[in-house]
Amino acid sequence: YKNLKEFAENASHELQTPLAIAHGKLELLAETNLSPEQYQYVDDTLRTLRKLSRLSESLALLTKIENHEFTDTADVHMTKLIKDSIRSFDEFIKLNGLKVSADLAEDVIVTMHPVLADFLWTNLCQNAIKHNIDNGCINVVLTPSSLRVSNTGKPLNVQPESLFERFKKAEQNSDSIGLGLSIIKHISDQNNFHATYRYEENWHSVEVNFRNSQS
């Protein structure tokens, strides 16, 4: 078990360097005099490398969560974390033509590992951005007992609960690696939170209830 754990961690770490080198060389190649067809090949390969990098990082994170490597907890100011993060995502959100509304209770404190708190929110937010529609909306609601992130999107063609499984995606041909909701589920389980997914009238909602939160 220990050898398998070390292999997974080492493999994920060692993959990042060759992926970064390949990515850099392809970006340089894209700046040369390529035909439209050649440029498309380069662009497709860059997209694949970015997906591989995200996959490696996400699998490494899941391994660490499952091995309980984030056991130290602290009082995390979720209200501030989300406010600051929304501002940092602002350009990306505008680039995707999305509108965000946030109803955040003041001074919500959640007891958990600070790194996992950041991963929890980031994956919720990125999930809502990636799986949205043109000129869509995102709605964030934070209370002392829960965090809900909702987004407009295409109709769901799988059971909502199954999306928390690894590599399960609503659209199998999408650019998603299918691990974002699995990470959310693992973080929730480790902290005795409860994560649920609901689809209703073209709105997708992921809610995390903080069973051991303090406010």
Image (tube, helix red, strand yellow):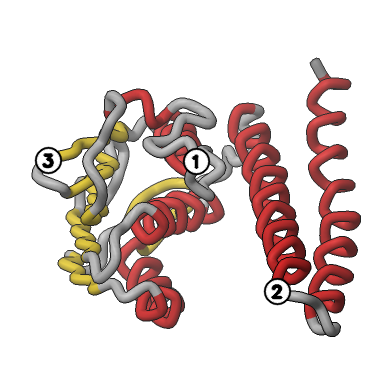
Tell me the residue at 80%/37% (across/down). Answer: 9
Mark with earlier residue (2, 1):
2
Q: Badge 1 is on which residue?
A: 173
Q: Are marks 2 and 3 in contact (CB under 8 Å)?
A: no
Residue 159 pos. (x, y %): 28, 24
Residue 104 pos. (x, y %): 20, 66
Which amino acid type corresponds to the residue marked 1 in the rendered image?
A: Asn
Q: Badge 2 is on which residue?
A: 36
For the residues labelled 2 and 1, the Cα–Cα distance comes to 24 Å
For the residues labelled 2 and 3, the Cα–Cα distance comes to 42 Å
Residue 82 pos. (x, y %): 35, 67
Q: Is residue 39 above or below residue 169?
A: below
Which amino acid type corresponds to the residue marked 3 in the rendered image?
A: Glu
Mark with earlier residue (1, 3):
1
Circle 2 or circle 1, nearest the eye: 2
Whether residue 9 appears in this view of the structure is yes
Tell me the residue at 35%/71% (across/down). Answer: 80
Crowd tier of the residue under label 1, counting other residues whose Cα lies within 10 Å: few below 14, some 14–19, many 20 or above: few
* Number of numbered discs: 3
Is 145 on the left or on the right of 173, as rendered?
Answer: left
Q: Which quadrant would residue 55 be assigned to in this image? A: top right
Tell me the residue at 25%/36% (across/down). Answer: 156
Q: Nearer the viewer, residue 157 or 92?
A: 157
- Is the C terminus in the top left, top right, bottom left or bottom right quadrant? bottom left
Q: Badge 3 is on which residue?
A: 200
Residue 202 pos. (x, y %): 15, 47
Which amino acid type corresponds to the residue marked 2 in the rendered image?
A: Pro
Q: Which quadrant would residue 129 be assigned to in this image? A: bottom left
Q: Is residue 101 above or below residue 130?
A: below
Circle 2 or circle 3, nearest the eye: 2
Is 29 on the left or on the right of 101, as rendered?
Answer: right
